[in-house]
Image (cartoon, rainbow, N blue to C red):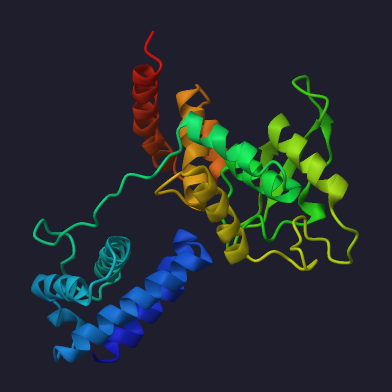
Amino acid sequence: MTDLVLRDALEAYETVYMPSRNLAERTRREYLNDLEDLGEFLERTGLKDVHEVQKRHLEAYQAELDRRGYARSTRRRKTASLRSVFPFLKRDGYINVNIADTPSLAKAEHKQPRVLSEREYKDLLPACAHQTRDAAMIELLLQTGIPLSEPSRLTLRDLGPPARIKRSRDTLRVLRVRAGKGRGDRYVALNYKACRELKACLMVRPEIEDDHLFPSKFRKPLRPRAFQNMVRKYLDEVGIEGASVHTLRHTFATHHVAKGTSLRTVQEERGHQDLKTTSAYVSLAREVMNRELQEHAL
């Protein structure tokens, strides 16, 4: 691949398009890795210029992904990456036609998010009740839908000043969620259930120099992988299959929509920039409601 195809185009995509979209740091890394892989593939085909790339080359790349035996989720992400870069290249004059915008190029497959049923998440909470810190972290995800990376980064300073609420003797707090590079901090409300578990957690939290809210058993900041493994352990104990940490985020949004929480509120809590992203939970909520009507038939 020539400088124009690989270095110039990808550098422009990285320095112009990504900042303009305010993409998360992890998303930026994944997109760039995907596009570098695409560039290497096109280079091996002997392409010399960005204008030489045609839809058959992209179709051949997708066939190559299948040949490599990548997981479906990986192929979806790589397809989304190439569908993102070619409109940018056309807009900025690198190419005349967006070759990724064609019905013959398979779109990224859509996988319905896994959502815990009410019975499942009510079974999960007692399973971790004997570990105060773990119970607080899982309750925090269920009640706020914050991302996997956040609990391990939270500090005591991220808990805002309390305010009395009627539902419980515990206090309502506001939690500061520190976003990644290029994205501003935001604040989410902690309801009485989250406050109750956090209060219990703070009462037994060891006195350490580090101010991380959830220290590990070695009194060090808890790493995201350790948190992920902790959630996985309790899901396995309860016998909940096909679920993960991200399932708790989807469960929060879906059940709130099903129970009547406004989309705007869910959008703010989840940190979605576009309400259309949040609207996807309407159909999931409908499925949850239909399932409960069947299970709870009179």
Residue 149 found in image quarter? bottom right
* Image vertical order of residue 28 relative to residue 283, above or below: below
Side (left or right) of 192 relative to 116: right
**Extreme top residue here?**
298
What residue is drawn where x is 26% and y is 64%? Answer: 79
Count how many numbered circles sit on residues in the image.
0
The location of residue 200, given as percent across then percent down, is 81, 41
The location of residue 8, given as percent across then percent down, is 34, 84
The location of residue 145, given as percent across then percent down, is 56, 43
The quadrant in which the C terminus is found is top left
What residue is drawn where x is 30% and y is 70%? Answer: 92
Is residue 5 in view from this perspective? Answer: no
The location of residue 60, given as percent across then percent down, is 12, 75
Please name whichever residue, 13 or 134, is drawn nearer the observer in this view of the structure: 134
Please name whichever residue, 29 or 98, is drawn nearer the observer in this view of the structure: 29
Side (left or right) of 7 relative to 247: left
The quadrant in which the N terminus is found is bottom left
Side (left or right) of 96 relative to 182: left
* Image vertical order of residue 8 relative to residue 110, above or below: below
What residue is drawn where x is 47% and y is 44%? Answer: 239
Please name whichever residue, 151 or 4, is drawn nearer the observer in this view of the structure: 151
Is residue 192 in view from this perspective? Answer: yes
* Image vertical order of residue 81 relative to residue 193, above or below: below
What residue is drawn where x is 34% and y is 22%? Answer: 290
